[in-house]
Amino acid sequence: MDELRAEQQRDGVPEGNVSLLIQSVATRWNSTFYMLKRFVSLAPHIARVLASPKLKHAPRMLSGDEIELVSDIIQVLSPFEQATTEISGSEYLTGSLVLPMISCIEAALGNIKPTHKVSKVLLKTVKDSMSTRCKAFQSNPLLCHATLADPRFKKLYMQPTIAAQAVTEISSEVRKN
């Protein structure tokens, strides 16, 4: 870490802005994402540190191809990090965010063009998993009602038939009460 800090300072990074590696923690949702992102951003500095003759038993540095693969993986995981951060709010209600987040994640995943075979497989697996796992959420009455009641979203992120059904249910509930 001292060598990494010194290497960054040689490149003109002030002491207060020096970045260190982040370790993945199993209990922190996005820690692996943050670890990979930081590693890629520090890769040139890490390579110079690992190439130093002072370090006799240093691990090998990732190749350029491997770093590109990690960059592709970061790109695939990025929508999930953004959604997790947004939906983890403790100062506001988050139920109405579920359907818009699913829609935004699916749209973001559709725009990703990975370059490596492994990251293409990852992207396909993630898309398939999203469609399988999130299908039930998109017709969940509580989430539909919450999204419909939120003036930011209303029917925007719902399928028309499900939105019509939710409007009917809410209207009948209002008339009943």
Image (cartoon, grey):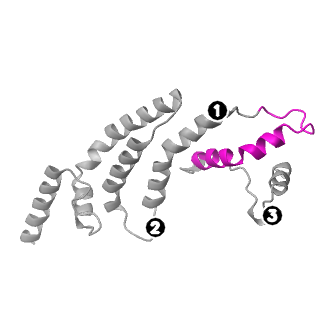
On whether residue 52 falls in the magenta region, the answer is yes
Residue bounds of the magenta highlight? 32-60
Identify the element where label 3 is drawn.
Answer: helix
- Residue type of the residue flagged with mark 2: Ser
- Determine whether, in the image, residue 158 is placed left or right of residue 122: left
> Which quadrant would the C terminus be assigned to in this image?
bottom left
Label 3 with label 1: CB-CB less than 8 Å: no
x and y percentages locating residue 76 in the rendered image? 49, 42
Say which residue appears at 53% left-offset and 30% top-offset: 116
- Residue type of the residue flagged with mark 1: Glu
Label 1 with label 2: CB-CB less than 8 Å: no
x and y percentages locating residue 21 in the rendered image? 72, 49
Say which residue appears at 35% left-offset and 60% top-offset: 97
Q: Earlier in the sequence, mark 3 or mark 1?
A: 3
- Determine whether, in the image, residue 79 is placed left or right of residue 27: left
- Determine whether, in the image, residue 18 is placed left or right of residue 97: right
Taking depth in this image into account, of 128 and 133 the one nearest to the observer is 128
- List the residue tagged with mark 2: 90
Q: Which mark is residue 35?
A: none
Distance between the alpha carbons at the discs numbered 2 and 3:
33 Å
Task: State whether residue 83 is above or below residue 48.
Answer: below
Q: Earlier in the sequence, mark 2 or mark 3?
A: 3
x and y percentages locating residue 140 in the rendered image? 24, 51
Say which residue appears at 89% left-offset and 38% top-offset: 55
Identify the element where label 1 is drawn.
Answer: helix
Mainly helix, strand or loop, the magenta region? helix
- Determine whether, in the image, residue 152 is placed left or right of residue 126: left
Badge 1 density bin: few <14, some 14–19, many ≥20, Cα 10 Å: few
- List the residue tagged with mark 3: 15
- List the residue tagged with mark 1: 66
Q: Earlier in the sequence, mark 1 or mark 2?
A: 1
Distance between the alpha carbons at the discs numbered 3 and 1:
29 Å
